[in-house]
Image (cartoon, rainbow, N blue to C red):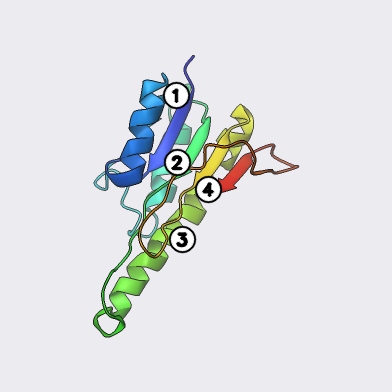
Amino acid sequence: MNKIALITGGSRGIGKATADMLRGKDWEVAAPSRDQLDLSVYGSTKYFASAWNAAPHSLPLNALILCAGEWFSAPLEKIGDADYLKQFRVFLAHQNIMRAFLPRLAEARGCLYSCLRRWRGDCAVQRSKGGSRDADTGIRARVQ
């Protein structure tokens, strides 16, 4: 069976490039669009994870790759509270999706990758060996 990856933000940018690279290496990739998994809507990740985990013969998860993000490139006085709240909801959604898929990742001894956007928006999934492995779950976590 091919390895399976779930990528947030996989429909464009670094997430799409990561999805394309993994597909080229014969991975099965789930990269839900914003219509399928809108991280700025509270509770959407819990619903998505519940549907994935409740599916008959639910699939193992070899990699959870977090690439989605909201970033506002504007002068401080032009960024409102609603913009900051949207960024926070995306951050919280990633926390929720990590917790929801932790059992699936542990079962497959999978990896968790978090691609954090920097100020200039440059970011890449770390491909080198390393990262840390959780002693309880065995999950490797890398943050770039």
Q: Do the residues labelled 3 and 2 touch (CB within 8 Å)?
A: no
- Residue picked out by circle 2: 50
Would you say 107 lies left or right of 12 here?
right
Q: What element carries label 4?
A: helix
Query: Three-letter amino acid code at disc 2?
Result: Ser
Say which of 142 and 120 sits in front.
120
Query: Three-letter amino acid code at disc 4?
Result: Met
Sequence-wise, which precedes: disc 3 or disc 2?
2
Q: Is mark 3 on a helix, strand or loop?
A: helix
Task: Identify the residue at image location x=39%, y=63%.
Answer: 89
Q: What element carries label 2?
A: helix
Q: Mark 4: few, some, or many residues within 10 Å (few <14, many ≥20)? A: some
Label at residue 56: 1
Q: Which residue lies furthest to the bottom in this view?
A: 77
Q: Position of residue 91 (x, y in %)?
A: 44, 60
Q: Mark 2: few, some, or many residues within 10 Å (few <14, many ≥20)? A: few
Sequence-wise, which precedes: disc 3 or disc 4?
3
Q: Mark 1: few, some, or many residues within 10 Å (few <14, many ≥20)? A: few
Depicted 128 relative to depicted 58: above or below = below
Sequence-wise, which precedes: disc 1 or disc 3?
1
Q: Residue furthest right?
A: 135
Between marks 4 and 2 in the image, the one whose residue lies nearer the viewer? 4
- Residue picked out by circle 3: 92
Query: Three-letter amino acid code at disc 3?
Result: Leu
Would you say 97 lies left or right of 42 here?
right
Q: How far apart are marks 4 and 2 (CA)?
A: 13 Å
